Image: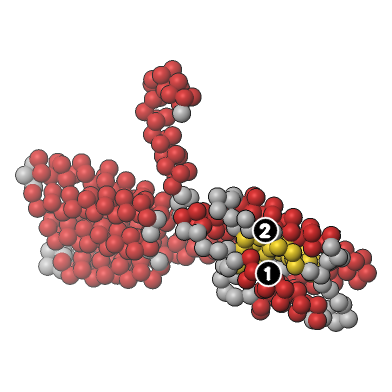
């Protein structure tokens, strides 16, 4: 804070810029990581206000009250929705309301001013594909097209109407194709960034994010939650005696085996090598019972025919005011004890 103040007094010319960017980044950092759609809604809101507000003022100034009211209504809606999204992060419903608002605003403008404002239909249909799902965007686009063509049916020549319909449909179609591509790429990238490619379990990055999110929701609403750390015993021997391929195969079967036993809300992550983590919604006793059942079952199961494998487990329940690093460290210490006392067992960290 001190350095920022000093910087501002030293460089008055860039004062406004620094103040704005530091405020934005501080808000972003302290509030949350914004989703792309969320960002886009906020960006659209800001751009919408900057683009429409001068028109609203000018229209009131020049006595065009009706259109001025339409413009002003759109601006007010954008500000309210933008503030709601920023405050709550609930961008799904906000996205629909936001899109409906500017789409209906465009239709209303055509109703009030006729073909004079028809060109707004293009950016409006384009924007739909960035704020709501593909099907919803297509439905809103078609609804706008139907309403607008009905409104201008008596005031434009059939050839002009045809030109408008064809160009509008083309814009909507390109927006659809582009948005679908972006969506598929996002899904692909998100899987690549969060899933362990060998086993299909969540990867280390996904685990870190999940643990951070669990710790932060625990600080707001403390509910018992435990970290369970699994480490396959003498895994190196599998590689050494049967080859790396069999080791890989064992890891894959181990994840399948775990996923059958875990509940839907108990996500499995691969910490690295032959170490896996599960976050259990429950106290240390519940987590320990689950871990022991899994350990016991694995002991009796041959995931690879002829291969007997056991697992050591460390359990730690999240303490009040504890951060993710300390929580993980206690689970890791418990795992170390399980290894140290002979493997194939579950050890728990004390909670108090
Ligand atoms: N096949 C295979 N092996 C891996 C993979 N990642 C790590 N490893 C091997 O896992 C082994 C882990 O060895 P250690 O850390 O000594 O653990 P350990 O043999 O299970 O011994 P303890 O944990 O003390 O019971 C190493 O030989 C690594 O090469 C992988 O993706 N596939």
Could you say where residue 20 lies in the image, as x and y percent from the top left? 38, 34
In the image: residue 172, left or right of residue 296:
left
Q: Quadrant of residue 215?
A: bottom right
Check whether the beta carbons of the residues at disc 1 and disc 2 lie within 8 A of each other.
no
Residue count near mark 1 (Cα–Cα under 10 Å), binned few <14, some 14–19, many ≥20: many
Q: What residue did someone put label 2 on?
A: 350
The yes-or-no answer for disc 1 within 8 Å of ligand 1 is no
From the viewer's side, name the closer residue of 259 and 233: 233
Side (left or right) of 265 relative to 48: right
Q: Position of residue 216 (x, y in %)?
A: 51, 54
Give coordinates of residue 185: x percent, y percent: 54, 61
Q: Residue at point 36% right, 51% down?
A: 87
Rendered position, 336 above or below 289: above
Left or right of 174 in this view: 227: right
Depth-wise, is mark 1 or mark 2 nearer the camera? Answer: 2
Residue that appears at 79% across and 58% down: 336
Q: Residue furthest top?
A: 10
| Side of 216 relative to 75 (left or right) | right
- The residue positioned 87% from the left and 77% from the top of the image is 307
Instruction: State the quadrant of the C terminus.
Output: bottom right
Q: Position of residue 88 (x, y in %)?
A: 37, 55
Q: Which mark is residue 288?
A: 1
Q: Secondary structure at mark 1?
A: helix
């Amino acid at each position: 804070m001190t350095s920022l103040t000093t910087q501002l007094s030293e460089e008055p010319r860039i004062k406004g810029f620094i103040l704005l960017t530091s405020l934005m980044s501080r808000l972003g950092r302290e509030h949350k990581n914004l989703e792309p759609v969320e960002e886009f809604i906020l960006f659209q809101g800001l751009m919408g206000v900057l683009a429409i507000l001068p028109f609203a003022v000018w229209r009131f100034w020049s006595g065009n009250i009706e259109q001025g009211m339409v413009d002003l209504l759109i601006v007010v809606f954008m500000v309210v929705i933008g503030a709601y999204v920023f405050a709550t992060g609930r961008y799904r419903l906000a996205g629909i309301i936001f899109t409906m608002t500017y789409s209906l605003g465009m239709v209303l403008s055509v109703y009030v001013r006729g073909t004079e404002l028809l060109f707004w239909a293009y950016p409006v249909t384009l924007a739909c594909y960035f704020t709501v799902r593909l099907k919803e965007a297509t439905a809103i686009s078609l609804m706008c097209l139907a309403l607008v063509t009905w409104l201008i049916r008596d005031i434009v020549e059939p050839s002009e109407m045809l030109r408008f319909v064809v160009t509008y449909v083309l814009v909507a179609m390109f927006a659809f194709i582009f948005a679908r591509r972006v969506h598929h790429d996002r899904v692909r990238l998100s899987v690549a960034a969060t899933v362990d490619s060998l086993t299909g379990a969540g990867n280390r990055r996904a685990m870190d994010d999940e643990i951070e999110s669990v710790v932060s929701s625990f600080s707001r609403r403390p509910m018992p939650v435990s970290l369970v750390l699994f480490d396959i015993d003498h895994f190196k021997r599998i590689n050494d005696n049967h080859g790396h391929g069999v080791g890989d195969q064992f890891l894959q079967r181990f994840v399948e085996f775990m996923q059958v036993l875990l509940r839907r809300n108990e996500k499995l992550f691969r910490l690295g090598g032959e170490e896996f983590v599960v976050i259990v919604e429950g106290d240390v006793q519940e987590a320990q019972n689950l871990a022991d059942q899994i350990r016991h079952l694995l002991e009796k199961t041959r995931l690879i025919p002829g291969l007997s494998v056991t697992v050591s487990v460390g359990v730690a329940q999240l303490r009040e005011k504890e951060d993710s690093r300390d929580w993980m460290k206690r689970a890791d210490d418990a795992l170390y004890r399980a290894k140290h006392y002979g493997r194939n067992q579950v050890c728990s960290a004390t909670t108090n």
